[in-house]
Image: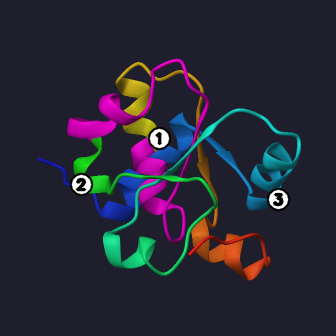
Amino acid sequence: MSYKTGAELTEEARGRIREVTPAEVAAMRERGEKAVYLDVREPNEWNLGRIPGAVFLPRGQLESKVEDSVPRDAKVVIYCARGNRSALAADTLQQMGYEDVASMSGGFQQWAMEDREVES
């Protein structure tokens, strides 16, 4: 049996999903586009700051709890710290029937480095 690394799984997921940059996400927010900004980081990361109005759902709870928090017909932008967990999460949501899903490349780290609005 052939095994894959975590990096390989993440890259495969990236091939199946759409990624958006922090600049594109900021532009969406400025235009007032209705979207769910889904933060899949861990609680200690969430507590350090987040995109204003984001929904918090750690990656480890995604499959079991997302349907309670995010409607299937919603536009969803998922982010994590650097864009790896969010790529896997976007792939998972697509498999669960969510159609308008994107992962934010660079994650919250890039968002903050670009001096975008942060809620604490």
Q: Classify residue 95 by image quadrant.
A: top left
As shown in the figure, which amino acid type bears the numbered disc 3? Ala
**Cα–Cα gap, marks 2 and 3:** 27 Å
Looking at the image, is 5 positioned above or below residue 101? below
Q: For the residue labelled by badge 2, is the local secondary structure a helix, a strand or a loop?
A: helix
As shown in the figure, which amino acid type bears the numbered disc 1? Ala
Residue 86 within the segment the image draws in magenta: yes
- Name the residue rendered at 48%, 81% in the picture: 48
* Residue extent of the magenta highlight: 63-89
As shown in the figure, which amino acid type bears the numbered disc 2? Gly
Looking at the image, is 61 positioned above or below residue 45? above
Viewer-proximal residue among 84 and 68: 68
Residue farthest toward the left in the current orientation of the protein: 1
Residue position for label 1: 90
Q: What's the mark number on residue 60?
A: 2
Viewer-proximal residue among 103 and 65: 65
Viewer-proximal residue among 67 and 100: 67
Which circle's residue, 2 or 3, is located before the other in the chain?
3
Give the crowd class for mark 2: few <14, some 14-19, many >=20 residues within 10 Å.
few
Looking at the image, is 47 positioned above or below residue 61? below
For the C terminus, the quadrant is bottom right
- Name the residue rendered at 69%, 70% in the picture: 111
Label 2 vs label 1, nearer the camera: 2
- Going by the image, does 27 lie left or right of 52? right
Residue position for label 3: 23
**Cα–Cα gap, marks 2 and 1:** 13 Å
- Name the residue rendered at 41%, 56% in the picture: 40
Give the crowd class for mark 3: few <14, some 14-19, many >=20 residues within 10 Å.
some
